[in-house]
Image: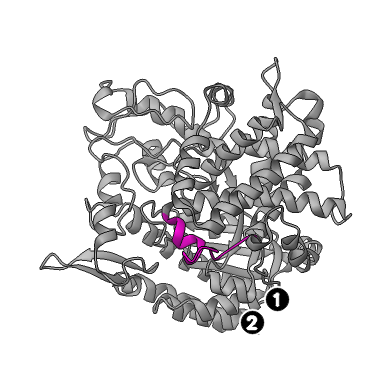
Amino acid sequence: MKHIYKAARLLMGGALLAGFASCSNNQEQTSQQTEDTLPSKNSLENYVHQRIGIYEPVKLTTNLNDLSPNERKILPLLMQAAQIMDELFWKQTYPQRDSLLNTVKDERVKSFIRINYGPWDRLNGDKPFVVGVGPKPDGATFYPAGMTKESIEKASLKDKYNPYAVVRTDSAGKLISVPYHILFATELQKASSLLKQAALLAEDPQFKKYLDLRSEALVTDDYTASDIAWLDMKNNTIDIIIGPIENYEDKLFNAKTSYEAYVLVKDKVWSKRLAKYVTMLPALQKGLPVANKYKAESPGTDSELNAYDVIYYAGDCNAGSKTIAVNLPNDELIQQKKGTRRSQLKNAMQAKFDKILVPIANELIDKDQQKHIKFDAFFSNVMFHEVAHGLGIKKTITGKGFVKEALKEQYSWLEEGKADVLGLYMVTGLHKKGELTGDLKDYYTTYMAGILRSVRFGASSAHGKANMQCFNFFKEKGAFIRTAAGTYKVDYDKFAVAMNELSNLIITLQGNGDYNAVVKLQKEKAVIPAELQKDLDRLSNIGIPVDIVFEQGVDVLGVK
């Protein structure tokens, strides 16, 4: 098994820490063990020793030769701003970071805490590995500690679901809403200043405008103008996605956003190859395998598909499993009016393909079908997953408002499941039209291997739940079989049928805003069957990593 560090045997970092004596190597185990069943003083050593090896180190670099002198000067400024987002995410998810790290002497334990942005193992069902912290709060730090979901729902606070504000209690015990730009004013002012400095150096006028507007957005929590300016950018070579964006961390209501940042360099050759697909969205929307009332919306087409080298991750996107493609902005009104930008993080994607997906396929995909595991197919499947977020339905047909509002904390995992299966639907449709080259079996087989990769992210991940659902649904429909050799073999005809049926199910549930049905679906389908669990254990036992961790920054990149 590979490890991130070459340190010697783990040392205990003080009485504060303990681990799990009976924990297996399996990365996605979600057993209900509690801390009082874990008496071994060496259990932390064993646990971290086993778990830290699930992350394969990858250097984030790019070819700087095509960048202008000013663009090279901008990159360090953007990375500094990104580092501030990293600090803010820590404050959102585990503000006691420094006091915890100060009690730990062993560097490997510290590294595991940093990878997970706290004392909960994100790729193992958020299992705590520090005594006394208890389960990870579903509401992170967005809501008052110990306050129940029901109490928040009943509270009369007007903007309790504001994505850019936390809920707190005042001195009188009354609930109040505190905007991010006030709570984190000092840090956000610094980040804003860095973006303004970068804007002064920017040569592309659209990029300059975006940086100026985003710098203002950070200190006002009004992101609409900068989101639109970001979509309007067409010719920039470097880019930064920065701010409070995704709401995965809020597992109570899926309402509050977390800080993150990506610093990007565009791959113009690959981006040019992708440009044509955006214009095809309306036709693909009309062809969705669902009743007409669920596909009456028209997806925006004033958007782009681009490929990038990502050179810096920070905050939410760097926690646990690493994002390899981005579909933004999340604002439904902007999506309907302008569309979205789908950013494919090609170098990170290639690393996951080479270091994780190919080894998984060699172990678990039928030998006769392993020849169909291709990077181009993996790239397309991931890309069209992001494009597919723009398809389907955004507002319920039952008067329950936007789908996101109706499904609450159940929204994210089902939306990821929709994007997975509609991405495959898009690949199938475009291949039939001759818009995608290669054998369709490449895409289906690589998709199957992708499911086996992503279910390892576990029950605490929206993407993990989505892939568990897809695995169980496709299995029931006979889209694949498990052979006597313990490998998975795709039935290509049934795969296409299952794809359409799952697409219909998810879009219908979203369009109806049927919260209770989605809860039922999660409980029944978003689970790992025992047989699959044994196969995932095989991957762990032979040392196949679950995800990657980055070596990044100005020194790695070679800029000052």
Residue at the (76%, 41%) spot, across then down: 496
Q: Is residue 421 above or below residue 525?
A: below
The amino acid type, in three-letter code, at marker 1 is Lys
Residue 121 at least partly seen = yes
Is residue 108 or residue 383 the one in the foreground?
Answer: 383
Answer left or right for 164 relative to 342.
Answer: left
Mark seen at residue 206: 2
Residue at the (64%, 31%) spot, across then down: 476
Q: Secondary structure at mark 2?
A: helix
Residue at the (68%, 54%) spot, across then down: 290
Residue 146, percent from left and from top:
21, 50
Residue 467, percent from left and from top:
58, 40
Look at the image and say whether residue 404 sits in the magenta stretch: yes
Name the colouring of the figure.
Answer: one colour
- Asked if the residues shown at circle 2 and circle 1 are in contact, with their CB atoms under 8 angstroms apart, the answer is yes
Q: Secondary structure at mark 1?
A: loop
The amino acid type, in three-letter code, at marker 2 is Gln
- The part of the chain drawn in magenta is 392-408
Mark seen at residue 234: 1
